[in-house]
Image (tube, coloured by chain):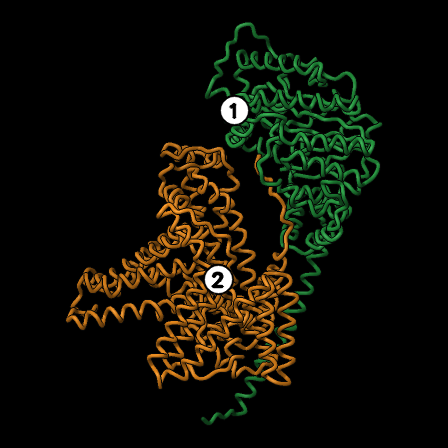
Amino acid sequence: MDIRFDAADLDRVASRRQDASAFLRKWLMSLSVLALMVATLNLLVDPYVVFGTPRLPGISLFKPATKNHAMLAKTFQVDRAHPHTVLIGSSPVHIGVDAAASVWPASMRPVYNFGIPGAYETSTSLQTLQEAVTTGGVADAIVFLDFQNFFSPENPDPVLQEAARRFRFRPDGTPNPDSRQQRATDMVLALETMGALIDSLTTIALQRQSTVLDLAPNGSGTEADFIGAARDDGMHDLFAQKDSFEAKRLDKLAPIMAGWHGTLPDMDAVASIIAFARTHGIKLTLVIAPHHVDALELYWRAGLWPRVEQLKAELAAMVAAQGGAVTLWDFLDYSSFNTEPVPTAGDRRTPTSWFWEPTHFKKQLGEVMIQRMFGTDAPKFGTQLTPDNVAQRNAQVRADRQAVVCDRRGVMLTALDNPPTDRCAGTRTAHAPT
Amino acid sequence: MLFNSYSFIFGLFPAVLAGFCLLGTYRREWALLWLTAASLFFYAWWRPVNVLLIAPSILINYGLCRFLEHTIERQPARARAALTGGIIFNLCFLGYFKYLTFGTQTLNDLFGTGFILTQIVLPLGISFITFQKIALLVDVHAGRVGRFTLREYALFVLFFPQLIAGPIVHFREMMPQFRAASCRFDAENAAVGLSLFFFGLAKKLILADPLGTMVAPLYDHAAAGLPQSMADAWIAALGFTLQIYFDFSGYCDMALGLARCFGIKLPVNFNSPLKARSIIDFWSRWHVTLTRFLTAYIYMPMSLSAMRRRMAAGKPALGGRDRNASAFITLLAMPTIVTMLISGLWHGAGYTFVLWGLLHGTLLCINHAWRLLRPSLWRNTAIYNRRAAPAAFLLTFVSVVFAMVLFRAPSVSAAIVLWKGMIGAYGAALPQAVLSRLGPIGSGLVALGVHPAWTSGSFLLMAASRIAILLVIALALPNTLELLAAYEPALGVKPARAPGRLLRLASWHPNETWAFGLACIALAGMLSLGGLHEFLYWQF
């Protein structure tokens, strides 16, 4: 075969090669400049508060992107906070307990809120407490316990899985050799990932909105999501949606919880928290967090109330064994705080005072609890539990519940479709705050 | 090692390309040897022990090829026996790793036996490699391939851009290219190759992967037997269809691009299948090289054999005016069903894949039957093509989406739950938040029987908008092959004779606009490689 090229063909080939070479040079240059710009923007906006870049009004004052990256953000943030007191728990703590509240005694400040939204295992609380203590200077720890967390599903808490490599210590207290590398990786990812870029741009875009979700430097989350949802859908829908979610969750958990024999699972995690606090000289307060009556009614219906009472009794016994070094507060009861009526469907104006929905209390109630535990002149809400008063407390709560379901069933959504059949004779109304 | 990993993009690939070009300036053989060694390293990365499995298989198959070359003319019976033995060997090799567990499970299900197998780990890309080796044995036996060395054979099997998931290539379309490759850096090949690669990376990571997270809980619910609302079931079906669409499309682009950087053009494997107007058309666009393989090596031999038997018996063939049901069933329907059953099994060892294959086989038969019957029912083909096109597209699309549920569902029962949801057997429900925002329309929907549900309205809106955007990309925009047609991105691809306005405007050329555009696409893809994968807490 005779193949011949004329000069025009050769020129065309050379020209195409030149075009392609120029294309590759310009592409590489554009890519480098763009990558640098992305890193600079992410460093400046710092959407996950990983770098601690100063917050700029109009650009990065509020940090809405921390909503889905709370564990990452708080692990880096707590190092900079140098707290005296740490709050440990899940989303109710993150949203409902303000670390900057004026009711905190001066001796306990600065307070850092290490509540992690989405955490559903008690062992997560142990690890976050360990992590907080590595910052040095933590003298007080307030650990909020959630009844349902004592029956977490078999699979490990995804929040904890994600953070396990980042924490400085493993659950058994030994140093984590992967921590430094993971934190370096976190920083690179916070600079050069699509998620970080989108979150930076979203952060800037949301700065001018009237209600923006934020993570304060003390770890407290804002209630912006709830405020927005209440404005758009009304409080009734917030309660109804969460009731539906909780009912489904309890459907799965109830068979495990109802038929449980012996000490509740996860009590060893509480024991580890107590032991860790004692070893490090930390004053520990355990708190059984309050729920709205709607959520409590779901526990009753699922036949779980005996387990709630068992939890209180076992915790009281465990705490008593520490000889006064640990305090246990129980807010899981019936009072005017958690029996306020839920606004009717379609009502988007009437607010509630104490709860956003059945399991998330408002900051106002968080302040009442702080006052009750550490202050004076507090309303009579919740009780400090001991082995001596736990039986009486459980009986009182049962009686209060009877009063609520008989006299004030209209306050709860869960009672509307399936009224309780308990006998109502001789009941009394839940006590009001004083 | 995956194409969409830091270690590949910033480590192996640049190193292999640099070594290839550098060695190519000295000796081509060294460059090709380097490429083979790098491909073996790429293969071993995931599980080094796999090399011990694939290496003997390569040697045995090469030996068989040589034996066939020597015996095909002098001892055809021995050659035929060797070919049969070779095919059986390769199928057993594949069968052991891929189908033994499924076979045992089926046996247990059918006969109530209790055989237990320990988990067998599937070697990477074994389905693709096996088909390529079988095709080569058949081609050597048929005299369609000339002589080749062991090094050439190893490169053909191991060439890493097509090793994991295709395309399934023919020796006769690859080896001439390897033999003619300059093995030096070529700026145009690099520009075209990198463009294809980063288009694919962006498709995979930005378009496909987020859909996986979106649909996973819906399939989990279905697997648990929980009823699915109509909206959720359609999100699950459409979401997965688009996920696999962009995932495979992205992979194919990446494979084409990587090969092109070494001066090799791979065949077309994916060509906007969702734009198909019939199931036959769909299979000429989706996994094209698999369809080609199955047609050439399974369907055609079966059909031709049946044809010979019918002709020997004096029965009419299929075609012309002598159409009859028995000819259709024997010559077309049966081979099609069997071929698609094998296609289903090839895709995965499980009942859902078997059913998926049978379903597509049935759809193909219906399509073929319609093609045969339609001219007598609707005589004017031009008007038919014009008027029936939208309905044909819609019917094909819905059929493909329905069938795709089987591809993703963890069990047949889960697929049935989703199908029932799609046809509204569990009722239609929309989140209360969405219904209340719709105002009078929401009230109208409730009056029509749509139930309010306390599910997340934001999920529904996010899913619906994402699906809508991706459908526009898949159905309305030109694909990568069309964009780069002027530079033959895949074997045999030529520019359209009458490109549309959009295609004329968007066609890829090595100019400044595309340099910047590709930089944005590449950066978006690379930024999506890593992520702060944390638990998403979005519900109230």
CA distance for labels 1 and 2 = 49 Å
Q: Is residue B511 above or below residue A192?
A: below
Chain colored orange = B
Helix, strand or loop for disc 2 = helix
Chain colored green = A
Residue B391's image quarter? bottom left
What residue is pinned by disc 1? A302
CB under 8 Å between discs 1 and 2: no
Residue density around tag 1, few if under 14, some if 14–19, many if 20 or more, within 10 Å: some
Residue B46 appears anywhere in the view = yes
Seen from the viewer's position, the closer of residues B490 and B504 is B490
In the drawing, what numbered circle is on residue A232? none
In the image, what residue type sits under mark 2? Answer: Ser
Residue density around tag 2, few if under 14, some if 14–19, many if 20 or more, within 10 Å: many
In the drawing, what numbered circle is on residue B249? 2
Q: Residue under mark 2: which chain is it in?
A: B
User: Residue B176: x and y, percent?
Assistant: 48, 82
Q: Is residue B162 above or below residue A49?
A: below
In the image, what residue type sits under mark 1? Answer: Ala
